[in-house]
Amino acid sequence: MRFDLSDEQKAIQSAARDFLGTRYDIRKVRELAETGNYDVSIWGEIADLGWTGLAIADEFGGQGLGMVELAVVLEEFGYALAPSPFLSNAAAGLLLQRAGSAAQKQRWLPAMASGKATATLGVLDGKGRALVPDAGIASVIILVDGQAARLVEGPVDKSTRVETLDLTRHYYPVEGEDGELLEGDVSGGMDLAEVALAAELVGVSQRAMEMAVEYAKVRTQFGRPIGAYQAVSHRCSTMLLETESARSATLYAAWAADSHPEAAPMAASVAKVAAADAGWHVTASALQVHGGIGFTWEHDLHLLLKRAKVDGHIFGSVSAHRERVAELSGLPSLVPEGVQGL
Amino acid sequence: MRFDLSDEQKAIQSAARDFLGTRYDIRKVRELAETGNYDVSIWGEIADLGWTGLAIADEFGGQGLGMVELAVVLEEFGYALAPSPFLSNAAAGLLLQRAGSAAQKQRWLPAMASGKATATLGVLDGKGRALVPDAGIASVIILVDGQAARLVEGPVDKSTRVETLDLTRHYYPVEGEDGELLEGDVSGGMDLAEVALAAELVGVSQRAMEMAVEYAKVRTQFGRPIGAYQAVSHRCSTMLLETESARSATLYAAWAADSHPEAAPMAASVAKVAAADAGWHVTASALQVHGGIGFTWEHDLHLLLKRAKVDGHIFGSVSAHRERVAELSGLPSLVPEGVQGL
Amino acid sequence: MDLTLEPSEQAFRDELRAWLEMNNPGPGPEGPDQQFEFRREWQHKLQEQRFAGLSWPPEFGGRGATLMEQAIFGEEITRARAPMPANVLGLVMGGPVVIAHGNAEQKARFLEPILNASEIWCQGFSEPDAGSDLASLKTRAVKVDGGWKVTGQKVWTSLAQYAKWMMLLARTDPDAPKHNGLSYMILDMKQPGVQVRPLRQITGESEFNEVFIEDAFVPDENLIGEVGQGWSVGITTLMFERAGIALASAMTIKQELGELATLIRERGMDADSVIRQRFGALVVHAETMRLNSYRGLSQAIRTGIPGPEGSMAKIQWADINQGLTELAMDVKGADAPLADPVWGYRLLRARANSIEGGTSEIQRNILAERVLGLPKLR
Amino acid sequence: MDLTLEPSEQAFRDELRAWLEMNNPGPGPEGPDQQFEFRREWQHKLQEQRFAGLSWPPEFGGRGATLMEQAIFGEEITRARAPMPANVLGLVMGGPVVIAHGNAEQKARFLEPILNASEIWCQGFSEPDAGSDLASLKTRAVKVDGGWKVTGQKVWTSLAQYAKWMMLLARTDPDAPKHNGLSYMILDMKQPGVQVRPLRQITGESEFNEVFIEDAFVPDENLIGEVGQGWSVGITTLMFERAGIALASAMTIKQELGELATLIRERGMDADSVIRQRFGALVVHAETMRLNSYRGLSQAIRTGIPGPEGSMAKIQWADINQGLTELAMDVKGADAPLADPVWGYRLLRARANSIEGGTSEIQRNILAERVLGLPKLR
């Protein structure tokens, strides 16, 4: 048993941390966020590194690595707060690979693996609309509606982009009626997408925690570093606890997806809930540690806070996943299927 | 505007604190709790002080004072953790006076005012049973079922007493089918009973908070009184905040019951929720401040903790009152009446 | 225990409410400068009724309102969703300080322009390195001929861009123990040594400024109180400010809970018992905050000074605002990410509530040390 | 990242599980003394398979189990709801200390009777004035001819009433800095200077004792390690204890959540979405605690020593137990007050979880200082 990254996985992690740390230095992130852009040139480099095809099978030109490796890279994208379609593309790839037909996979996965095409994913609300990340640049948009999913070709008109709290990612409202059905395991595919999202949130939490801890060591009030006061230090301990819990849950869910499928649905929901809760709690708590300076636009913390909040509301809702955890843990649902749904 | 006790009310408070402090010294409380007794002789004194008839109208031989005065005395009963049927008798008196017929009031209130008879009150659960405090000594038992209430004559057989977490009060299961209907304002009467219960809980919280603060000043670890550590001092601040919030809510609800009837239902539910939550949070938090010693039977804290827990589950449920607050604050209930009920 | 208003208070409230119904100018124009001018006009209107100098003694153009009347005013103006007057800091803090601690010349010089909003005031207390630990502030005032040369940096200074005067706390004696070396002076903002830079918040707006002060001059006649007494001159106003604000804040929360109930119904979430319980819990919390504030006010009226218990409502205010905006996000569900000038804005703005005006941590210290008598950490 | 067991571990688990299915003696008799004798028998049975001295090297009668196997054992014995062996503290702490720090004579003298439960061990670390601040303990050992005279008071001493030996931390040098003046020795409980008094808990039962020690004698040969090295001898065992317990604790919580689900269904509360959300949140919390524990174990296996991260699971364990018992009360509703040996008992017992084995406050200090590197409060 090794509940930790293998040396190979650590190498991927370290490469991702280095690459993203230089390409998405926080000043660059801020610049992209404030101008509303991604940086297309970096996308090419990401594809060259093979990350676009990381979890896509060999037969479709991907690296055929597992969900754990993808989660490792996604955590680093979250840590770097990279303005990039990497998450949406990866999540759509996971769903397509799990639920698409042979023809659908053959048509799209090789292009996605090579980085030539990108895909994205949205979950329809009760009114048949979805807020879809990166739909303005995606060749493929997958719209999920309960247990069903349809594939439509993109991109949508870039001018339809809507403003969200999160400045570092681009969202588009998409109506979902038409499109080819995905006939495979949509639920299993969505679980993978949720794990991908959870991994990003772990990275966001980690970054916010590190910023808070660093600040608590150097900021002095009443003659002591504020990190010596339990009001601050215990708050930081709680941030650690939430971040590490989300990380444990996400790594486990990723591993289960690869290697222990019977545990995967429950594990995915646990990861989703733990990571979404941690994302908001930790970034908000980091802001409190920073005091007034953390409330300024000039400080980078708000970019993390906003990413975390929005991430907590895309794909399935946290309460639906909490409900699913209850359902899988001894409280079978009494509600007829289809009424709830994620 | 004076959101504070009048001089007269303060005199009542001070008399109650003094009397109960001597009659129910904590060693006496413990002795009564461990032997499962009340002290009948003290009841006679309580009646002589006029407290049994405090809120009963002059015409029935009571003092005709208000809910505020009764709340003041009840807080002191809670503070003293007095093993006594005072709360149950007072609550039943409030309900009887508000909802009873002229004949019912004439028959019972004078005897209750003089202390010769006691009454009690229980709320029936879904199965037509109620856990009724002090039913083994009460001449009158009022059983509340939703918006209806019936009066049955007591007492029930003392041997039917059941053990509860709370050692300082005696409970009896009572089945409720028969009895004379109370035809008046049962809902308004129950609101008064909830305020009475809330007042007791404020006293319990106050006592637990004082014990914790006192201990935090004298207990030393790592070279400092533990109350100098924010993990402890901020916990104590939260205890203060919850206790004072419950007190504000209770005093307001008591005043509204006397003087501002249109605000009384909402105020009663707010007081109930605030006091029940404070009761458990504050006593449990006080135990944490005490550390191991607070977990021992020899320490008095557990008597407060257990009273608070049980008080939080008699009369209406906290969640039903929270629901009612929502209902009275802009979210009309969608559930047909009678399905929920307190 | 009697929460009914005195007849005179009732009359004041009725009069005010009726007047607001007739005269409330509504939200006013967009754009910060236009909005500010609009509020200057509104202040003139208010002052016609002596509502601007509400608490000030009549001899200085005020109404001499009691604490209770001030609280009623805060509640009513919030209830009516009427704007605040432009020179709010001068009215609530600057004027009262001059009245309490200023000399006759200072009163003659400063008060009238506060009332008529011809001279706007801002407050220069906080600094980048002196937040919770305000008394450690470093801005220095060095004695020169006829006055003081001031150098330092202030932050979180609202209205600085419009202000003629800053209520300045500066260190006049670097060798004295930290609270003792401070003096309170009135700094002319319109001089070359004073630079104002807007401070953008995470909400995108700029409510506050940074003020950079370099060799700015304050004449001797602008010192309020004695040299070295600045801490006590400045700090008392903060307590009165809090007591006045608490009831208005409780009213704002009540309004926002009402809007939240509307949102819940509009979104069809009113059958969701989880949402209902969370909403009910917030209302309970808000009600106890309101009642705690009333109790605090009642005590302040009797003792003449607000007590440290006011920290309770401050903590509650932040908790409730944060909780209610988070609930709104969950009600919005899949729409929560969308930029929304109401709930999205409030969610972000609420994060500052546990920081501004004394962090929740500092409020808990105050309760522990000053109400419960627990030992101070040394 | 690979959570599959090694074939040898898998085999160990399968063997153990099968053996437990055949041999689990069930809950055993009521009454503490009868229960204790029952567990002594059970230890004999366990030791037939070398499960009692599980972690001990084979030359001392143990199985030489790896950390992973120890964790599996804890999980499986909990899963089977089988009892713990009588001499649990001797097996998990006393024996390992003697093996690691004892000399040949001590190993010959003490180990065998631990394994066969003929001599029960208890632990004498905590004192009334030394709880969180354990190193401030005051029990004094004064050098006398051939040994030490010990005087002091210990508290929270489980099994003291049955114990022959106490693992004693005592102050042998009152002048040394507080951690340095301690020594670890083995005290004979069966002597006139040692009095045991049961300590009744708020649950009504007595799991623990107070031990009053007055001029008790410890011979030189019962000193473990060097004089003054008691802190390091004693404290390492606590960390290993925690790592071993975490997985068993996670399993217990899983079982109790299962029982809670049953209660919810039996009470017809399974359609209540508030209850479902609270239950789901607890399960998520419990799962992350379990997974954090596995991660901690995995790290301990590689580094050889459990890290300070173990404090996370300890905090979670207390929070979850307190949360789940409170939820059970709300599910019981109007029946919650009734004395109930299951949920009523657990509600009260759970209050100690955030105190025993290091308070949650101390665990947060550990995380802040030792994992995050935040400054220690001085």
Image: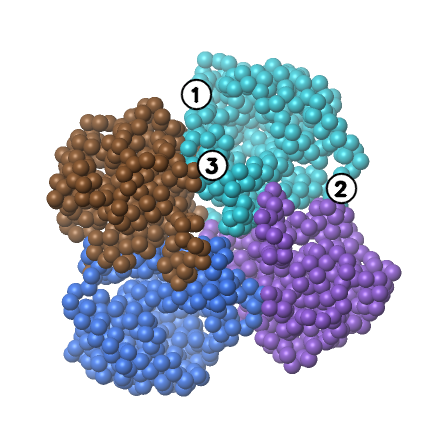
Chain colours: A purple, B brown, C blue, D cyan
Residues at marks 1 and 2, CA–CA distance in whole angstroms: 47 Å
Q: Residues within 10 Å of mark 3 (few under 14, many from 20)?
A: many
Residues at marks 3 and 1, CA–CA distance in whole angstroms: 25 Å
Kind of residue sitting beneath label 1: Arg
Compare marks 1 and 2 and give the one earlier in the sequence: 2
Kind of residue sitting beneath label 2: Thr
Q: Which chain carries label 1?
A: D
Element at label 2: loop
Left/right of residue C281 with respect to residue D39 in the rendered view: left
Front one among C239 and D268:
D268
- Residue A91 lies, in percent from the top left, at 72, 62
Kind of residue sitting beneath label 3: Leu
Q: Can residue C77 be seen in this view?
A: yes
Residue at 76% over, 34% down: D9
Position of residue A19 relative to residue B216, above or below, is below
Q: Do labels 3 and 1 share a chain?
A: yes
Q: Mark 2 lies on which chain?
A: D
Left/right of residue B20 with respect to residue C151 in the rendered view: left
Left/right of residue D253 with respect to residue B131 in the rendered view: right
- Residue C73 lies, in percent from the top left, at 26, 71
Q: Mark 2 points at which residue?
A: D4
Q: Which chain carries label 3?
A: D
- Residue A255 lies, in percent from the top left, at 73, 50
Q: Residues within 10 Å of mark 1 (few under 14, many from 20)?
A: some
Q: Mark 3 points at which residue?
A: D347
For marks 3 and 1, give the one nearer the viewer.
3
Compare marks 3 and 1 and give the one earlier in the sequence: 1
Front one among C377 and A68:
A68
Q: Name the residue under label 1.
A: D197
Residue at 34% over, 80% down: C86
For marks 1 and 2, give the one nearer the viewer.
2
Q: Using the rendered view, name the quadrant where residue A161 is placed.
A: bottom right
